[in-house]
Every structure is written in structure tokens, then in C-alpha cells.
Image: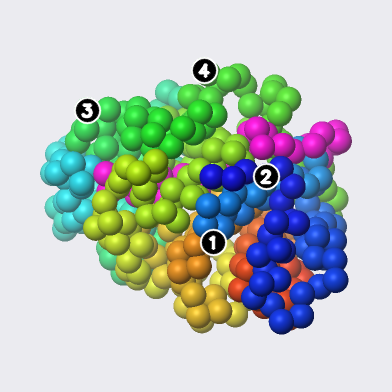
Amino acid sequence: MKSKSLLFPAILILISACTSSPPSDPKIEFDSLITTAMDKWEIPGLAVVVVKDDTVLMKGYGSQSFDISKPINAETYLQIASNSKLFAAYTIGMLVDDGLLNWDDPVIKHIPEFKVPDATVTNNVAIDDLLTHRSGLTEVALGGFQNPEYTIEDLLKELENTPLSTRFRARNHYSQAGMALLSEIVHRASGLSWEEFVQKRIFGPLEMKNSYTSTADFTEKVGNPAELENIMKPAVKSDGTVQMGSWQYIGSERLYAPAGGIISNMRDLSTWIQFRLNNGMKNGQQLISSDALHEIRKPRIPVDFSSFNMPWSCFHPSAELMDVGFGHFSFEHRGRRVISHNGGWMSSVIAIMPSESIGVGIFSNAWFSEPIPWASLGFVNALALDIFDHYLGHQEMDWSSKMAEIVTAAGSD
């Protein structure tokens, strides 16, 4: 694998081969696209990873922190939030390969004491329902992401008395509690905690030496995120002004680690992206079967964006349909399927286009909810589309500007 510290000269060399009229100075044009978009959206800092075939390219833009000028490098720690959910899907796939569970196993097969107010759901909600967020379970993290004292026993007790948020299997309805149940299923099926399993079966084999499964794991091994130097720090927007954010609501303790706990860096995440593009292969070893990957990537149900409190177009301004797979969303872009997920605490996206062997990771320190909730997700999603387009030879659309128009219009409604 080749790794380069300067990202975009190499990227545009590849693009020019499939573009009839390449720009006269592609490096300036592509770097300018990113910096112009950051200025438009007032994004303080950005880490960008692009993987194409066997080439890995990384670059940091802006500053790690809103209030201090500090460059972003390949080792800068990144909170990837809900991008962790696809790691959960891979852990389940590996356990299916091991013969220790099945995708459609009822939850009660592995957690017999699981119970919700609806007996039909209690008896029938399955692992695949949790992975696609169609269980109907509450969307909130009962007990809180940041509560280290909250246990699986506490969660099970609360679920027993918590009404469903929506009808069972009626639609995609995001559930953090469902992800916590997956963590416990991995534990009971494998004998390892979810964190131990991820370390043994993913982080270790992929040599992701600076990746951690939860805030608790990271704090024990590295230190308090709020006190470290080389880490992306949250920025928020309030009354139109960008300012330093708080760490209070960022990160996940161990119970909700599969929902949003992972902390990593550009170097490690580039390995994760390439592993996915290589269909589960690392150093000649198949770490997850092609059958399991097929099940993970298969489209399951349409996305219902009414539960996200943000415009559908903030994910893709022109796609007509987005569907849900195990631990991810997918949509069509330029006739190619894109498998994607966002992280919300500091807006990020990891997206791959398998047919073209292109993967993109974009990690900002922006946590903006003006003029609409999760506004800064629009920025990272648009920038991912811009990068895909450069590889595909499409330069007629500035997705970042298009997305800014959509977000502004949604905020004025």
C-alpha cells in the first residue's frame, strides 16, 4: 500500500485520465474546492482520506480546534460517532461465519430476559431488525451515551417498560438501544465483550494500532479526550457564530460503543476503508466471508427520513431513493452504488463506491445545528460526492454549493 501525505496532486492525476479536458492546474483546483467549501460552511478543521485501489491519500485542512491554530495530521484522533455502526455489522457477520449465530436469530435466543411491552415484538425481533433499525425500539440511548454506570441489566429493565417508538418492522427508525443489544449479543455468543471482539478480529488483524472502541477505552489507554493535544475538538454554531463546543455530549461509554464509540485517526481509518474495498481481505487473509459481506451490503428497506429531523437532500441532493443495509445506508450516484454512513457529534462520513474501488472518509470538527439540525452533515456528504465526481470525470456540479442552498432554504421554511 502506498501512503502519501499530500493528497490531491495524486488524486487529480488519476482523474485526468478519465476527463477529456483536465484543468490546467488540478492541484490548485481540487484543494481550492475543499477550502472554498470550508469557508462557505465555516468549518474550522477537516481530515480527508481517499482510497483508490492500492493507493491511500490523506490530508488535513484548517485546524484541530476552533480557537487555536493547530494542523491536522495522520495521527490526529477523530471521533467517528455513528460510523461505528458498520463495525457492529461486521462483528455480527464474523460470528455468523463462526457458526455462533444467524442474522435472523431472535434477540431472545441470545438474551432470554429481553422483553418489551409488546409480546409479539419480544418474541420476534431479530438481529437483522436491530441492524436495519426496523425493530421499533426507542431511538434514544436510554441511560445516556456518557453514563459509565449504566449496564445492560439497566437497559433491559427499562426496555421492558418503554413503549415502542414505531410499529414493529413498519419502517426504518433509528434505535441506539438496538445497537446496545447487539453489543450484548456479541458478548454472549463469543464470550468476549464487543470491545474485546473488535480488538481481536478487526483492529488487531488490520493493524489499527491507534483505534479505540469507546470513550472509556480511549481514556484508559490514551487520556481524557478533552485534555489531549492531537485530537479534533468540537466546534458549534450559535446565533450564527462559530465557537468552541463542549465535550459533555460527545462520545460513548462501553454499553453504547457499537452505536458511536470509536475513536481513531486517518491512518487507521484508511486501512478500514481499504479492507472494505478489498472485500474483507487483509494481507492475503479473508477476515470475513463474501457471503457475510453480501448480506451486510444487501439493500433491505427504504430510509424513512421523518425520524431524522432533517431534509432527505442533506444526504444526497438528487438521489431518488436511499435504502438501509446492515449498519449503513446506500444510494445511487452517477449509476454507481454508494455505501455510506455518517457520524453526528462532529460531522463525518465514510462512503465507498465498490464498483470503482473508491473510498472516502471525511471527518470535520463541526457540530452545527444552524440553520437546521445536523446542518454540517450536509457539508461532509456533499464533499464526498465532489470527490467521487472527480474520480468519475464529472466536474459540472459543485455539490457543496448545491447543498448549502438546500440547507439555507430548509432553515428559512
**Highlighted range, magenta:** 65-94
The kind of residue on which mark 3 rests is: Gly
The kind of residue on which mark 1 rests is: Ile
For the residue labelled by badge 3, is the local secondary structure a helix, a strand or a loop? Answer: loop
* Identity of the residue drawn at 78% across and 63% down: 30
Compared across the picture, whether 44 is left or right of 174 comes to right
Residue 113 drawn at (x, y percent): 17, 37
Magenta stretch containing residue 387, yes or no? no
Q: Which residue is mark 4?
A: 220
Q: Quadrant of residue 303?
A: bottom left
Tell me the number on the disc at residue 191: 3
Marks 4 and 3, Cα distance to the nearest angstrom?
Answer: 22 Å
Q: Which residue is mark 1?
A: 358
Compared across the picture, whether 210 is left or right of 90 comes to right
Q: Is residue 276 visible?
A: yes
Q: Which residue is mark 2?
A: 4
The front one of 20 and 132 is 20
Q: Nearer the viewer, mark 3 or mark 1?
A: 1
Among numbered discs 3 and 1, the one appearing first in the sequence: 3
